[in-house]
Image (tube, rainbow, N blue to C red):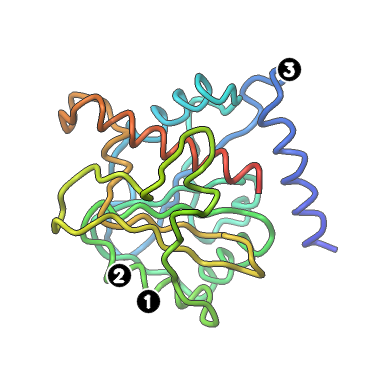
């Protein structure tokens, strides 16, 4: 019954999300986690992405994202949660269980490796979904074909280890519930222009891919 209630809530939020009569009716959140990693990195990223989505997708997301702890039961109030950082990540058993229930109940977690998170986040995701494997999301997946088309998958925003960008996913009962962007650094591309001084074309690609993720979440 609780699962049905949560999914029904997300369907209602989806309607509000794209409804012009309810400005700012939906909030998205930034995940705060333990372990010492800088979960607070890229402070201008989400506000800029929200502004871009509200303009290009005619969404009605509140301009200021909420910070939410991994173990907070109020996590179910946010249909989209973003996670980033450069270092260590640790989920307690109760936090892992909370995140698992959140994603199984209709929530979506986007993890953006800000460089250095990969070796830490993978075992923590295994703690959340021990029965699932991170798999590379194919380029023909709908997440790359929303408002903006990315035929070759994720755009390359920052060099990192000079590897091609990859998008990995956790699929629960056929539904993409977690999207992990690696060797890409979308969040840096969402930041204010003066922070990283990326070319505007690069920033636009990052914002467009971010908008695709947001749009996918509320259409799937």
Instruction: Residue 111: give x, y in percent of width and height.
Output: 40, 55
Q: Position of residue 180 (x, y in %)?
A: 40, 58
- Considering only vertical position in the picture, is 150 above or below 202? below
Q: Report, in whole angstroms, how far the alpha carbon at label 3 lies from the one at label 2.
A: 42 Å
Residue picked out by circle 1: 123
Q: Which mark is residue 120?
A: 2
What's the CA distance linking mark 1 and mark 2? Answer: 6 Å
**Disc 3 target residue:** 21
Q: Earlier in the sequence, mark 1 or mark 3?
A: 3
The residue lying at 58 percent from left, 35 percent from top is 27
Image quadrant assignment for residue 98: bottom right
Q: Residues within 10 Å of mark 1 (few under 14, many from 20)?
A: some
Q: Is residue 118 above or below residue 47?
A: below
Q: Secondary structure at mark 2?
A: helix
Q: Is residue 28 left or right of residue 44?
A: right
Q: Relative to 118, is 63 above or below? A: above
Disc with the residue nearer the chain's start (3 vs 2): 3
In the picture provided, is 206 more to the left or to the right than 125?
Answer: left
Quadrant including the N terminus: bottom right
Disc 3 vs disc 2: Cβ atoms closer than 8 Å?
A: no
Element assignment for label 1:
helix
The answer to whether the residues at label 1 and label 2 have Cβ atoms under 8 Å apart is: yes
């Amino acid at each position: 019954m609780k699962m049905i209630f949560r999914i029904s809530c997300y369907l209602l939020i989806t309607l509000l999300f794209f409804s012009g009569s309810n400005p700012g009716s939906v909030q998205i959140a930034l995940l705060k986690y333990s372990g010492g990693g800088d979960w607070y990195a890229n402070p201008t990223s989400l506000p800029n992405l929200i502004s871009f989505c509200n303009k290009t997708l005619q969404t009605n997301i509140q301009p200021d994202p909420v910070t939410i702890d991994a173990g907070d039961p109020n996590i179910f109030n946010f249909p989209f949660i973003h996670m980033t950082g450069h270092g260590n990540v640790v989920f307690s058993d109760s936090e892992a269980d909370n995140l698992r229930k959140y994603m199984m109940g209709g929530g979506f977690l986007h993890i953006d490796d800000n460089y250095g998170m990969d070796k830490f986040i993978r075992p923590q995701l295994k703690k959340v979904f021990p029965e699932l494997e991170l798999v590379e999301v194919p380029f023909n997946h709908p997440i790359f074909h929303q408002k903006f088309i990315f035929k070759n998958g994720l755009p390359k925003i920052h060099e990192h280890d000079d590897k091609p960008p990859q998008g990995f996913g956790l699929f629960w009962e056929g539904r993409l519930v977690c999207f992990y962007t690696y060797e890409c650094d979308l969040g840096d591309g969402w930041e204010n222009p003066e922070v990283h001084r990326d070319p505007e074309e690069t920033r636009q690609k990052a914002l467009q891919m971010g908008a695709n993720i947001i749009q996918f979440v509320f259409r799937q």
